[in-house]
Amino acid sequence: MGRSRQSWQLAVFMGAILLPSAALVIVSQRTMQQNRELALKHRLDEQRAAKERVAHEMLAHLEGLRGAVVQNPDAPAVPEIALVARIEGGRLLLPGDSETTERAFREATNHPPEFREAIQRGERAEFERGGAAAAVEQYTEALRLAVSPLQSAYARYQLVGALAKDGRAAAAVVQARQLLEAPMELVDPDGVPLAVRAAGLNELLANAQDRARVRQVLASALDHGPWYSSLAVYAPRVADQLNQIAPAENTAWDARIRQRLETINRRQEQAQALQNDPGLQAARPAAWALRSGAEPWLISTHAPGGRPQLLIAVRAADVFRRFEAAAQAHFFPSTEPGGELLADTFPGVKVLFSSLPADPSSNTAFTERIYYLAVLLLVGATAFGTSMLWRSLRREVELAEMRSQFVASVSHELKTPLTAIRMFAETLQMGRSQDRAVQNEYLDTITNECDRLARLVDNVLLFSKLEQGRMVYRFRPIEIADILHTTLRTLAYPLAKHSFTLHTEIDDQLPSVNADADALEQAVLNLVTNAMKYSGGQKEIGLRLYRQNGDAAIQVTDHGVGIAPGDLPRIFDKYYRAPTPENRNIPGTGLGLTLVAEIARAHGGRVDVKSSPGEGSTFTLRLPFRSET
Ligand code: ADP
């Protein structure tokens, strides 16, 4: 097979593996890519759906709150609602910090005028030197003239102050106790409940029972009263007073009050921030925007007719907590990293779902690795299989080539002796030579050529039997020496004709072996014939028969061309002929040694060769002796 053709075939072969493999890798990569994209899309879809769901529910809840507020803006009953405030001219009016409370108070205390005048007289007297007694009188009169609970409470409040100033502590305490029970809605112009005002009387706080009541009143005022009133400023003052008079009397209450005040302060801070917020006007009515700060709020406006009139603020923490557990989500301001914007209706709110894997690729990465491994294994296995296939294919091709070579060789080998036989036979037929000796020589040659032909045919027949598994050996006890002598007789003529000298050394005393005489003779013939064919002009051939360990050894030695080390392992292969230039001119079929090895094996023996190029070869055929039975 030509080198270039071989490498071209190899290239085609490699292409046959590599191209599909490459295609496989590309296809799998694309599939992976698509999988990844699909997983991502799926995740996004899921997230979007989850987001829409939770945003929808949250909005429904907040709109419910808005409905309640719009119906009754003055008394938002839900703790989640942090602030409801009017918006006027784009400005947020915080209840209690405007003139609203004061105006309301004035309106409620102006009528009847007698009441108002009595109060005014009292106030004037109170600020004169030593006017406290007169003030007490005026306030008592006002109390009598009062036409509403607010007026009564206010007159009493003034009265308590005047009595205390006048040094009538006991009377002041009596009045303060009564005032303490006034409803929380009754507030002074600053928005502080008058009941809480009564709590600030030092004389009242001297009594433990009264202190307990004051604590109750203060706590309920802070819990239910409007946090944005001055109450938040006034209440801590009363708490401090209580602490000074009776330190550590009720620390749990004190802690609760302080905590409540902290919340109120936070809210106030948040409300003030909102008041200065220029974005307030832009707040969309249908949306709930998150305002971070001291206390994060979700704010929305109520804007009938398009103009915002009312601001509704809901404690974001409360709303978020309500939905976080069910939705397995976490809500936080959009200023923080991570997560995704929740919805258009919730500006500034981000959401992060804990139920969804943070990174979808982590899951697919594992699958991908498995996939690539499988592809790699597949490609590897294919490459391995193909290389095996390639090798066996090449062997087949080689064998086929050798077989065709063999046919050519056999034909050639058949033709040469036939030509000789024909030539000599014709010569004899025509009676050209009358010389008896010459005639005999011609006849010897014909016989010899016939023997050669027979040997060749024998070899081919033997081989064909072996190939087809039809070979039958007829084993019987024989003396190897006898076989060798027969072989030598057969070869005597060709050896002599080509002037070979045969050195024999035959041990006639060896025990017999169990052998097929014909097969064994054929094997020895092949070895000696080879020694002649590959003699390279060195006409000395050795033939020995000797005992070696438990075997009979037949050794054929020549001093001819020898065999290259690279060829040694292959010379026993069928059809194999060493591809040397000398060999090309030597007729042969490549079957001789194959048969020798096969015959040795069938006899339980083996054949060895020692050879070096240019120095000759030694073949040793070993056969075990017959076991004595
Ligand atoms: P062939 O018909 O070619 O002689 P064989 O099977 O008898 O076939 O031998 C195989 C090959 O081994 C030969 O082609 C030759 O190259 C090599 N060979 C065999 N015997 C000898 C030898 N005595 N000296 C050198 N080469 C040998």
Image (cartoon, helix red, strand yellow):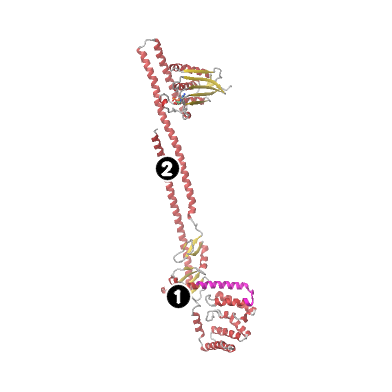
> What residue is drawn where x is 50% and y is 60%?
353
Classify the position of ligand 1 by quadrant: top left, top right, bottom left or bottom right.
Answer: top left
> What residue is drawn where x is 59% and y is 77%?
238
Quadrant assignment, res 396: top left
On residue 352, the disc is none
**From mark 1 to mark 2, how far is it between C-alphas?**
76 Å
Tell me how many marks there are: 2
Percent x, y of residue 178: 60, 82
Sequence order check, earlier mark of 1 and 2: 2
Q: Is residue 426 above or below residue 141?
A: above
Picture quarter with the C terminus: top right
Q: Is mark 1 within 8 Å of ligand 1?
A: no
Amino acid of disc 2: Leu
Q: Is mark 2 within 8 Å of ligand 1?
A: no
Secondary element type, mark 2: helix
Instruction: Tell me the residue that label 2 is attached to.
Output: 18
Mark 2 Cα shell of 10 Å, populated few (<14), some (14-19), many (≥20): some
Instruction: Tell me the residue that label 1 is attached to.
Output: 91
Percent x, y of residue 475: 52, 22
Q: What span is in magenta?
A: 243-270
